[in-house]
Image (spheres, rainbow, N blue to C red):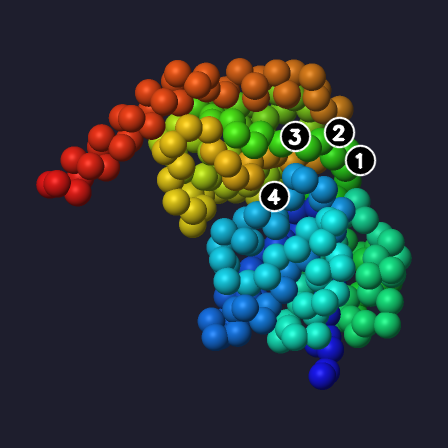
Amino acid sequence: MNVPLISVVVGPVGSGKTAWISQQIQDTSSVEDKHIIYFSPGTGNISIDKNHIAADFPNIQVFGDGQEMDLLKQIPTAKAVYMEVGFYLELQSLTQILDRLPYHVIAVLPSHLQDSEYHAWADEIIPGIPAKTDSSNHLWRVGTNSQVIDEDSLEEFWYELTHGAYGNVTRAKAIFDVNDGRSIYCDFVAGIPQADFLELNLPRYLEGRPERFSGIEVVGENLDEVTLKQTLSDCCLSDSLIEQYQQQVKQMLLEGIQA
């Protein structure tokens, strides 16, 4: 059985690596979905991209840290394998996984970036988003599993976050459960027009605290992590408010069906 050529996708923060991979998966016939693999190493338990990809393409195989052995078992049966390498990892750190496997390094790079380490690694260069690359790239991650965020408070928090209230933010992305039961994706790249929050292709969670992934990842410099964490915590709802919102949404949905 032939082992597929693994696409190892690298690039600086916010350059569009996940978006490029998503487009490749979308362009692949749905018949082959179960034969597509996505792997995001180095993200631990807070993998925004992995969970975003899994929601958008529920039929593909998605792997994260700690699942390397399962990944290696599935690679020979795959039609396409995409390995997304965050800016915090070096390609050389993946040699144990890639050892003796055929791979092709694709660098997604903004046009203003020249003669970088990515150019030295890459077999192919893809034009990326013109993201800023001059940050110290300090990384802050926090999981919010089981929490429900008040959406109005979240909008205020996200505005503050992306306008310098907690430090110079280069990149921010998150997946949150909000009070009407939806799971939403938040995305920010400095210097790029900000997109609206995006509802993920997941069912509304309307029975208690959500039993699914949520969390936030922020990249920048001089980040006030203590205030960030406290402000985010202040956006979270109590058990009684969660129940109240869920009952209201279920009633609205029921009335919509009856109408």
Element under label 4? helix
User: Residue 96: x and y, percent?
Assistant: 87, 60
Q: Is 67 drawn above or below residue 82 in the view shown?
A: above
Q: CA distance from mark 4 to mark 1?
A: 21 Å
Residue 142: mark in rendering: 3
Mark 2 and mark 1 in contact? Answer it, CB < 8 Å: yes
Q: In which quarter of the view is residue 17 placed?
A: bottom right
Q: Earlier in the sequence, mark 3 or mark 2?
A: 3
26 versus 190 height, above or below: below
Residue under numbered circle 1: 136
Helix or strand or loop: what does disc 2 sit on? strand
| Residue that appears at 28% across and 31% down | 249
Name the side, left or right, on which 244 lies relative to 217.
Answer: left
Q: Residues within 10 Å of mark 3 (few under 14, many from 20)?
A: some
* Residue, far bottom: 1
Name the front one of labels 3 and 1. Answer: 3
Residue behind mark 4: 48
Q: Amino acid at mark 2?
A: Glu
Q: Is residue 209 left or right of residue 38?
A: left
Q: Element type at marker 3?
A: strand
Where's residue 159, x and y in %? Answer: 52, 26
Q: Which mark is residue 221?
A: 2
Instruction: Give the mark toward the camera: 3 or 2.
Output: 3
N-terminal of the pair, mark 2 or mark 4, is: 4
Q: Amino acid at mark 3?
A: Val
Instruction: Say whether residue 111 is visible.
Output: no
Counting residues from the start of the chain, the first of labels 2 and 1 encountered is: 1
Q: Earlier in the sequence, mark 4 or mark 1?
A: 4
Residue drawn at (82%, 61%) of the image: 97
How crowded is the residue under tag 2: few (<14 C-alpha within 10 Å), some, or many (20+)? some
